């Protein structure tokens, strides 16, 4: 058989086994296939990766824990949710990855997130393995008391499976400073020790400065390095940002600092378009709206006459936020929010860069369209690694009992994002995929983890 035929046979065989072993887990299959496509040339070139069945081992979680969480609502009625922790790979360090509280949470989503986390963490050059967890609990609309009772009961079970040298969770969608605080308080009570078992803690009790900003800042640092690589910058660029949570807020903040203009923000109710631009005062309004009042983005349009609110259309086959003309686009909301239709709209609008702030926000079809049309594309495992990188820096501070200034943490974050950028380009070049950040990120992360797994034997 010719080379292409051999590849197709290998691909069909591998993916068929994966789907048979993990039926119905479409998000997980999508994440694995993206990596598989990129690393196939590496596996073909290195017999040791084939003979040691490295990829087959990486896609199988080392451990999945599923448990019941029972809690009492404000009316005295017991409620039941399901909790998870997927401990995906610990070849280069303890499991590290966030906890997500959202009705959509299931095993497939957490396996996809845990799988992505393996390579994202490897790219940071910090000694961190990959994991993910969460629950189908929805904190939206719950009182502080209800959230506290849920978090405490969630931690009663999760505490049996984590530790500051074993598995160090952090926040994700639905898990912010409030939830981390409630969970950490219960863990401290159970274990009778003050340890760095969670990251994203409050600055006054073991947290790191710049941690809330890190994912958004890191996204924009990475994007700036991409533009610098072609002799350009964010200055004067019009940008579309989706989301209005932590990542989107600080991505907008850093874009403004670097001279860019942001015209959108969104939440599950819809999005706002502000052609005048979201300036620093308007951004402060968004922060107060989402972080303190827990309001909806539609209120922004009520506050500012320059803005128009477009309600979400659940029946639409595309997301109209991506139909507006812009130089750069930053999907920062959730997975698969930007599809082929949206990618074509961005291409027609002459977008030059798309960098993922969320985990897997672009569908495979959208990614192919962007890359085929010469759009610079940054996968989330590289461009949104700033959050876990700074969590790693928080762990270092906890281990040593030190507390760095915001300037020191930010300096280290910039160095990490520059190294990730350069490592992606180097890996892509080594395997004949020049300037392909997706292939470079997958290859660089895979090689680091694969080499560690081989060195440690068949475990």
Image (cartoon, rainbow, N blue to C red):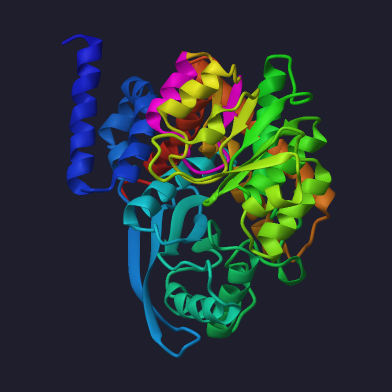
Which residue is rendered at x = 43% and y = 26% of the image? 341
In the rendered image, the quadrant that contains the N terminus is top left
Q: Residue furthest top?
A: 2
Above or below, 186 relative to 197: below
Q: Is residue 361 magenta?
A: yes
Can residue 392 be seen from the camera position used here?
A: no
Q: Residue 381, percent across and down?
A: 52, 38
Q: Residue 296, percent across and down?
A: 61, 56
Q: Return the residue nearer the eye: 147 or 156.
A: 147
Q: Is residue 449 left or right of residue 197?
A: left
Which residue is rendered at x = 39% and y = 30% of the image? 364
What residue range appears in magenta?
Answer: 352-372
- Which of the 4 quarters of the picture holds residue 45? top left
Q: Return the residue nearer the eye: 162 or 147.
A: 147
Which residue is rendered at x = 20% and y = 14% of the image? 5
- Which of the 4 quarters of the picture holds residue 147? bottom right
Q: Is residue 318 left or right of residue 398?
A: left
Q: Residue furthest bottom?
A: 76
Q: Residue 213, percent across and down?
A: 71, 50
Q: Residue 263, percent across and down?
A: 69, 35
């Amino acid at each position: 058989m010719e080379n292409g035929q051999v590849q197709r046979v290998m691909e069909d065989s591998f993916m068929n086994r994966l789907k048979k072993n993990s039926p119905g887990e479409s998000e997980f299959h999508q994440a694995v296939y993206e990596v598989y496509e990129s690393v196939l040339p590496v596996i073909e070139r290195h017999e040791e990766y084939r003979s040691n069945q490295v990829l087959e081992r990486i896609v199988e979680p080392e451990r999945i824990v599923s448990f019941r969480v029972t809690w009492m609502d404000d009316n005295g009625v017991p409620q039941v949710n399901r909790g998870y922790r997927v401990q995906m790979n610990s070849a280069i360090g303890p499991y590290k990855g966030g906890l997500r509280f959202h009705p959509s949470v299931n095993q497939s989503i957490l396996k996809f997130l845990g799988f992505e986390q393996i390579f994202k963490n490897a790219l940071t050059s910090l000694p961190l393995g990959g994991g993910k967890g969460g629950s189908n609990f929805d904190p939206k609309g719950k009182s502080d008391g209800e959230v506290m009772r849920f978090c405490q009961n969630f931690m009663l079970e999760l505490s049996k499976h984590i530790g500051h040298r074993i598995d160090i969770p952090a926040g994700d969608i639905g898990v912010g400073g409030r939830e981390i605080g409630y969970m950490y308080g219960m863990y401290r009570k159970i274990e009778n020790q003050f340890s760095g078992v969670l990251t994203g803690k409050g600055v006054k009790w073991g947290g790191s400065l710049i941690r809330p900003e890190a994912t958004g800042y890191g996204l924009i640092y990475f994007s700036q390095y991409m533009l610098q690589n072609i002799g350009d910058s964010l200055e004067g660029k019009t940008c579309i940002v989706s989301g209005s949570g932590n990542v989107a807020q600080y991505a907008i903040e850093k874009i403004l600092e670097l001279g860019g203009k942001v015209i959108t923000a969104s939440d599950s109710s819809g999005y706002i378009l502000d052609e005048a631009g979201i300036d620093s005062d308007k951004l402060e309004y968004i922060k107060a709206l989402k972080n303190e009042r827990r309001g909806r983005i539609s209120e922004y349009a009520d506050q500012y006459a320059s803005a128009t609110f477009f309600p979400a259309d659940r029946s639409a086959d595309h997301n109209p936020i991506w139909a507006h003309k812009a130089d750069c686009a930053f999907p920062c909301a959730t997975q698969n929010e930007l599809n082929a239709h949206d990618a074509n709209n961005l291409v027609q609008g002459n977008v030059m860069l798309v960098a993922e702030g969320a985990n897997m926000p672009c569908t495979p079809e959208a990614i192919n369209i962007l890359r085929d049309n010469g759009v610079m594309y940054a996968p989330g495992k590289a461009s949104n690694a700033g959050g876990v990188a700074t969590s790693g820096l928080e762990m270092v501070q906890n281990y040593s009992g030190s507390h760095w200034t915001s300037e020191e943490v930010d300096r280290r974050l910039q160095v990490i994002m520059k190294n990730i950028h350069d490592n992606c380009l180097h890996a892509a070049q080594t395997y004949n995929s020049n300037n392909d950040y997706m292939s470079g990120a997958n290859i660089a992360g895979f090689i680091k983890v694969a080499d560690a797994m081989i060195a440690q034997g068949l475990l």
